[in-house]
Image (spheres, rainbow, N blue to C red):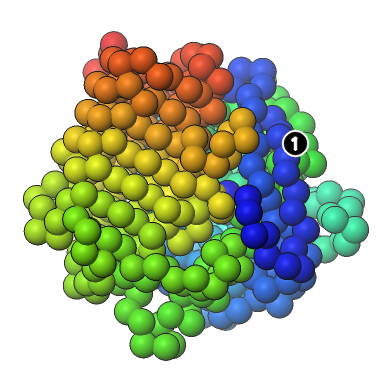
Amino acid sequence: MFPNFPRGKVILLLTFLVLVSTSALFSQSLIADSGKPGSCTDPPPSFMDPDAVLTGVTLSGTLGVYVAPFATLTATNPYTIAIGNCSNVQDSDLVSTTSPANPVTGTGEAYGSIELGAETILAHGATVLGGQTAKGGTTIGVYGKCPRKRRGKAGPACPSFVGFNSKVDGATIEKDVFVGHLVYVDRGAVIPSGYMVPNGAWVKAGEEMKSIERITREVRAFMDAVVHVNVEFAEGYNELAEHGYNVAGINLNPKTDFNHDRQFEPNLAGIPTVDPAFPNRIIGAVTMANTLQELSGVMGNQVALRADEGYPFTIGPIMQMDDNFTLHALEHTSVTLGASGTFGPHSLVHGGLFEGDPGITKTGDFFTLGEHSVFFRSTMSGANSSVGNYSLVQDSVYTGAGQTIGNCEIVVGNKVTPLVWKDKLPPATCSN
């Protein structure tokens, strides 16, 4: 996903429902595209980050597509992956025509082509796997129908969204669908146009209506805004590359309307730093207490700290950032991480606006975030607080020391519900 709004934009301050069991608040300041720069009405050339890995996949012929750092797209012959205009595949996403076997459930391997329609959004950490469906293969945003009216205009494309660390495994996601965070859409399932899926849900074939509810206008506006932002990234990162700025390692952010065409160098231990050879990505207004040399010892591989939308990020000395950790924020919001934090493999911290506070995303000292967990638009400011594995904390505030969220729990507005699909994970993963 505010001062000094850019001119020519229509700003929508929205509070809307993203479901957990019945409902959960999901609010953020949004910018409608309205044909302005970054809109899909006149998209720029596509951009693939140099740290993304595409095998058997090409962006040739596409426009407005943004593929973020450490995304992996793999098509194994004879299967294919196709991507529509103005789509985005975000940090540490996996898109593969092979769906591996699951020894926990006894499910075997599956294979199939994948097609992402125009304006498909794969949020940070999402996984999309191939498989055989009634439509032939896995599809997102290809079939179905768009709302009759979109901000006063009609068009053949409308966004579909797959949330943070969610998985679509051999399924069909139609146009105009919002899939929440840490969701599992299982083989053969079909989510029809005009619906959204609760955080932490398990959508099974033939039982889809048990897990979905009608989408709202506010959610549709949010998806439009995400398309706008990522089309601007395609344009902005192309401009960085064209003007000789290296789009790798530790580097400047691109100029966009939501950062008022400003660029920032990351700051490490008080030193402004640009280092294109650094193996991980640190982009824009990121201030870190660690030195460059120290980071090499506490960071895993494929770590992305991107202050190219929301900023600034202020990060105390790191204890550990494991492989595929991602830090990002919705526009006009910031993130603060306390000292001696530990962030597990494939975990995510994401800033946003909650209860009027653009800096709500904060962690205290000695904070721990488990593997595949998501910390979104929340505060855990007390020392020695922790979030377990495969858990989501969204729109929640904890100020005491030693606060603990267990494994495989979905927390929204400080209300705790279980991760519905935990039976697909090894028992030890969700043991508390």
Given the current orientation, which residue lies at the most extreme top position?
Answer: 432
* Identity of the residue drawn at 43% across and 19% down: 398
**Which residue has dot 1 on it?**
215
**387 above or below 218?**
above
* Identity of the residue drawn at 74% across and 54% down: 11
* Identity of the residue drawn at 54% across and 22% down: 412
Tell me: 37 left or right of 326. Answer: right
In what quadrant of the picture does the C terminus appear? top left
Residue 251, picture quadrant: bottom left
User: Which of 324/53 is in front?
Assistant: 324
User: Which of 92/237 is in front?
Assistant: 237
Residue 302, picture quadrant: bottom left
Mark 1 belongs to which amino acid?
A: Ile
Residue 110 in view of the camera: no
* Identity of the residue drawn at 54% across and 28% down: 395
Q: Position of residue 208 (x, y in %)?
A: 65, 28
